[in-house]
Image: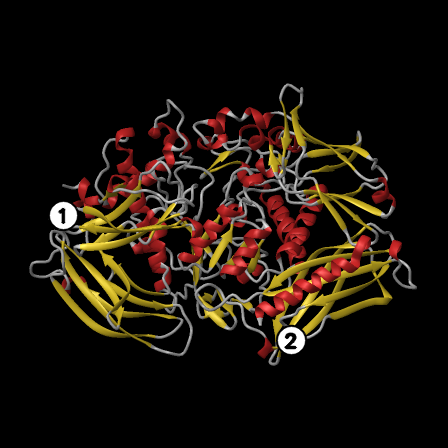
């Protein structure tokens, strides 16, 4: 049925184009043929393609190598001009009323010239700029975009405010960032000027497409379909947003095809009434019986059914009806999913709840935070990189990603892929960690930014909620930027920007298919309304969401963490692999020096070394020959820390705390550097991501130490839905550090109800560590199984591992047990046999091979307490890889202790 309907839709679309003939909107993209030059003309380069940026045009991705984040900064201090010549047919111009020259993204401050005349200016990277150029067009044309240095442009704006005795903080980033100042002066990717995880590469360029659009009356720009459900029907509230150059109301006819939902097209006619040129939108409602619709579900809860919709708009000016020279036929196709999503903030005895309910089901949101895939915006829409990251999130059982507010509004491909994979998106607007101007030109630009991006994104089933900024409320409340005597002014500006402008526009555009926007993150949610959106403590655990970071406490101890309703940011740093570092080293660079340069944390390496040394062996001296040890131990410590914090939040879902979300910071990287990521810049998983696949599994066993009762709280969590109770066995195995196989085992039965988490057992430590077992010579494994099949396992380490007694050389051996390769299907895999004679701690496998860039293991960083473990290895390479055991490096904590 699906194939049949898809074919029908394809035939319909082809027929529409056939019938449209010369009246259809004609679009010509200017993809190639561009040139750049700097201000004095000493540097030029031609034959460039869009999307493009100055950094990438001159030096590809070299800014990511060695110390080039500083060495190439001269690029950002110059002004640059893009140019391109193009021809148009005289008949094409004469046969239409309008020719749009549309720039979908210019980064950032520019003046646009057509045939030597100023066409317009741009000041917002996130805004689409459109100009009717029909009067200026000739058969031979010259297009030029003169882009100002973002560094000097930002300084110029800041100086202008300083001249009026106004400062809009923060002026400059921490010195460790090696960054640039006044990022908040520009509507540009804020992370371009550096962040604690990223380099400063103040980009310039045409980072999205440029096109000529020929039309007579109007064209379809965006479509929003907001879905809602009553007892018998799904109702689609459809808005087709048009763009027009006419200065009077016009007529039209919209034909709507939904071949999987409706037996015939729907025609919406404006033959007797007009479409307002000042607000050109066609809105109508279409109902579909509930029984004819398959629901769209988040990852882990069901299928992600998407329905294709096609729209054809015929617009004309003459009331008597359309004429060939008086009409435009414009078309657009989208896909939508049917789901309801609510943010429940009910009154409780102590605070408010804060959880998402999807299709009537309360869901614990498991996931992460997403930064741009590349520091250069023109390279951020790389589909292979996005596909790898979304697949990584799905494989780790995530159901929500927070698109962080210091980056970009992601590409259409990103949101389409989120729709396909059931990954809900918490969408920040692009404002982060700063105060911002609120003068009229700035607010006008922001208003356009919000409207355009909300119209583009709102139709997606995956987009769950919008938030107007990242951490700007808490920055005011905690006085991060010493606002001092001007605090009232900054409060007023905050409300003007986020409540009066961004939230106002979001509520108009991004309506009814999702909850009202959040004003900030973290925030007290609906409680913040009482405080006029600036609470004294936006991190109140009884309301809304929190962000939590503390690098000076024991991160393996669950007692240090808050008990919030929802944790939308938290995490710990680690270092990417030696292999990643070697790919960015200059000829004479040393890894440890480059790590120090790229470590932007205000406390330097101290957070990582403290985290490692609390529980793990002290790494060898911090120099190049020993960097592998520091890197490996940092990843083990990070994985354990995030595991403990995440599992605590999962364990609290059905308790008095009602925690219903855990989104760790962060999924990905923009370069090779110390950071909080679980997947490195090249797409390889750190130990954390391998562990996330286990500690975010739908059915999990969680063992956490409770210092108050001196016991282990054992929680069983099951996220899937249904009506069947799962009968399972819980086994507690007590091991000696020195020997394989458990020395004591106890098994009991348990029941797991769907979509729940409950405390299964409280086990006093003095009942575990008795007789020959002590906290120094023993550890405990908990296994959840059903019908002899292991569902989940976890470990409890009673003391610090570095002080454990009896750890031995595991005598680890690796064998390649099987190999499979089919180049035509890009399947390229091995099975590895890992053999040990003693317990091996955190077995970490690396592939060292000149032909290998990205690979995936079935598990990594694991505890091995049985003689043989099988690990599946897959390569992303399209050619077969010849692998021997010499290419396989295995590391364990044991080797640093014996």
Q: Residue 310 sits in which quadrant? A: bottom right
Residue density around tag 2, few if under 14, some if 14–19, many if 20 or more, within 10 Å: some
Residue 272 in the image: x percent, y percent? Answer: 88, 68
Q: Is residue 888 left or right of residue 661?
A: left
Q: Is residue 660 left or right of residue 38?
A: left
Residue 442 or 205: which is nearer the viewer? 205
| Residue at the outermost left position | 771
Q: Is residue 42 above or below residue 840?
A: above
Q: CA distance from mark 1 to mark 2?
A: 65 Å
Q: Residue at x 40, y 79 (%)?
A: 723
- The quarter of the image holding the C terminus is top left
| Residue at the outermost bottom position | 232
Q: Is residue 338 above or below residue 774?
A: below
Q: Residue at x 75, y 66 (%)?
A: 255
Q: Which residue is mark 2?
A: 288
Residue density around tag 1, few if under 14, some if 14–19, many if 20 or more, within 10 Å: many
Residue 158 or 43: which is nearer the viewer? 43
Residue 550 or 809: which is nearer the viewer? 809
């Amino acid at each position: 049925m699906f194939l049949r309907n898809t074919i029908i839709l394809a035939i319909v679309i082809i027929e529409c184009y056939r019938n449209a003939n010369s009246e259809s909107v004609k679009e010509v993209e200017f993809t190639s043929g561009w040139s750049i030059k700097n201000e004095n003309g000493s540097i030029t380069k031609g034959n460039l393609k869009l999307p493009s940026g100055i950094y990438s045009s001159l030096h590809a991705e070299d800014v990511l190598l060695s110390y080039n984040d500083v060495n190439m900064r001269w690029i950002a201090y110059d002004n640059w001009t893009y140019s391109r010549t193009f021809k148009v047919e005289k008949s094409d111009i004469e046969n239409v009323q309008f020719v749009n020259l549309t720039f979908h993204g210019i980064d950032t401050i520019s003046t646009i010239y057509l045939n030597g005349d100023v066409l317009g200016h741009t000041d917002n990277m996130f805004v689409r700029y459109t100009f009717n150029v029909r009067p200026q067009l000739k058969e031979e044309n010259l297009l030029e975009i003169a882009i100002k240095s973002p560094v000097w442009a930002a300084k110029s704006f800041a100086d202008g405010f300083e001249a009026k005795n106004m400062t809009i903080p923060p002026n400059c980033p921490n010195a460790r960032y090696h960054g640039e100042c006044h990022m908040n002066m520009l509507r540009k990717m804020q992370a371009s000027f550096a962040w604690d995880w990223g380099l400063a590469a103040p980009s310039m360029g045409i980072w999205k497409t440029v096109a000529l659009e020929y039309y007579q009356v109007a064209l379809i720009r965006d479509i929003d379909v907001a879905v809602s459900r009553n007892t018998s029907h799904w109702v689609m509230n459809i808005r087709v947003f048009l763009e027009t150059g006419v200065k009077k109301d016009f007529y039209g006819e919209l034909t709507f095809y939904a071949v999987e939902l409706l037996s015939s097209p729907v025609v919406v006619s404006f033959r007797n009434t007009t479409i307002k040129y000042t607000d050109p939108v066609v809105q109508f409602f279409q109902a579909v019986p509930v029984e004819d619709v398959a629901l769209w579900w988040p990852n882990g809860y069901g299928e992600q059914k998407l329905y294709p919709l096609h729209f054809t708009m015929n617009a004309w000016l003459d009331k008597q009806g359309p004429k060939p020279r008086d009409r435009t036929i414009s078309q657009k196709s989208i896909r939508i999913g049917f789901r309801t999503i609510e943010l429940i903030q009910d009154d409780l005895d102590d605070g408010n709840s804060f959880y998402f309910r999807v299709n009537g089901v309360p869901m614990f949101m498991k996931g992460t935070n997403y930064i741009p895939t590349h520091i250069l915006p023109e390279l951020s829409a790389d589909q292979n990189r996005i596909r790898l990251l979304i697949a990584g999130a799905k494989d780790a059982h995530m159901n929500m990603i927070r698109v962080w507010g210091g980056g970009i509004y992601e590409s259409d491909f990103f949101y389409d892929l989120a729709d396909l994979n059931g990954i809900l998106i918490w969408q920040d607007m692009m404002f982060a960690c700063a105060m911002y101007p609120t003068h009229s030109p700035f607010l006008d630009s922001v208003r356009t930014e919000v409207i355009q991006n909300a119209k583009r994104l709102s139709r997606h089933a995956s987009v769950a909620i919008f938030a107007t900024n990242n951490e700007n409320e808490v920055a005011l409340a905690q006085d991060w930027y010493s606002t001092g005597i001007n605090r009232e002014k900054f409060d007023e500006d905050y409300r003007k920007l986020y409540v009066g402008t961004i939230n106002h526009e979001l509520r108009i555009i991004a309506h009814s298919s999702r909850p009202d926007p959040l004003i900030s993150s973290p925030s007290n949610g609906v409680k913040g309304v009482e405080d006029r959106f600036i609470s004294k403590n936006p991190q109140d655990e009884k309301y809304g969401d929190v962000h939590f970071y503390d690098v000076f406490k024991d991160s393996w101890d669950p007692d240090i963490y808050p008990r919030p309703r929802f944790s939308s940011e938290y995490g710990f740093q680690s270092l990417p692999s030696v292999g990643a570092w070697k790919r960015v080293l200059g000829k004479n660079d040393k890894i440890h020096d480059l790590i120090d340069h790229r470590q932007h944390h205000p406390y330097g390496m101290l957070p990582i070394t403290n985290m490692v040394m609390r529980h793990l062996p002290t790494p060898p001296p911090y120099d190049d020959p020993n960097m592998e040890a520091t890197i490996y131990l940092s990843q083990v410590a990070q994985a354990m820390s995030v595991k403990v914090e995440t599992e605590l939040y999962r364990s609290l879902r059905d308790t008095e705390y009602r925690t219903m979300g855990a989104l760790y910071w962060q999924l990905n990287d923009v370069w090779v550097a110390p950071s909080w990521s679980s997947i490195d810049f090249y797409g390889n998983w750190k130990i954390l991501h391998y562990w996330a696949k286990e500690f975010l599994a739908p059915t999990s066993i969680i063992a956490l130490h409770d210092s108050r009762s001196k016991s282990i709280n054992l929680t069983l969590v099951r996220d899937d839905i249904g009506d069947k109770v799962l009968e399972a066995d819980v086994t507690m195995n007590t091991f000696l550090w020195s020997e394989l196989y458990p020395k004591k085992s106890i098994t009991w039965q348990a029941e797991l109800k769907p979509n729940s988490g409950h405390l299964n057992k409280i086990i006093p430590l003095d009942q575990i560590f008795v007789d020959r077992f002590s906290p120094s010579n023993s550890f405990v494994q908990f296994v959840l199984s059903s019908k002899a099949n292991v569902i989940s396992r976890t470990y409890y380490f009673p003391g610090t591992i570095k002080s454990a007694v009896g750890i031995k050389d595991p005598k680890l051996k690796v064998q390649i047990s099987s190999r499979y390769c089919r180049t035509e299907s890009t399947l390229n895999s091995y099975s590895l046999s890992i053999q040990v004679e003693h317990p091996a701690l955190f077995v970490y496998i690396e592939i060292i091979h000149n032909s290998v860039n990205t690979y995936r293991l079935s598990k990594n960083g694991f505890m091995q307490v049985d003689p043989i473990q099988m690990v599946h290895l897959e390569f992303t390479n399209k050619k077969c890889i010849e692998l021997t055991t010499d290419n396989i490096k295995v590391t364990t904590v044991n080797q640093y202790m014996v």
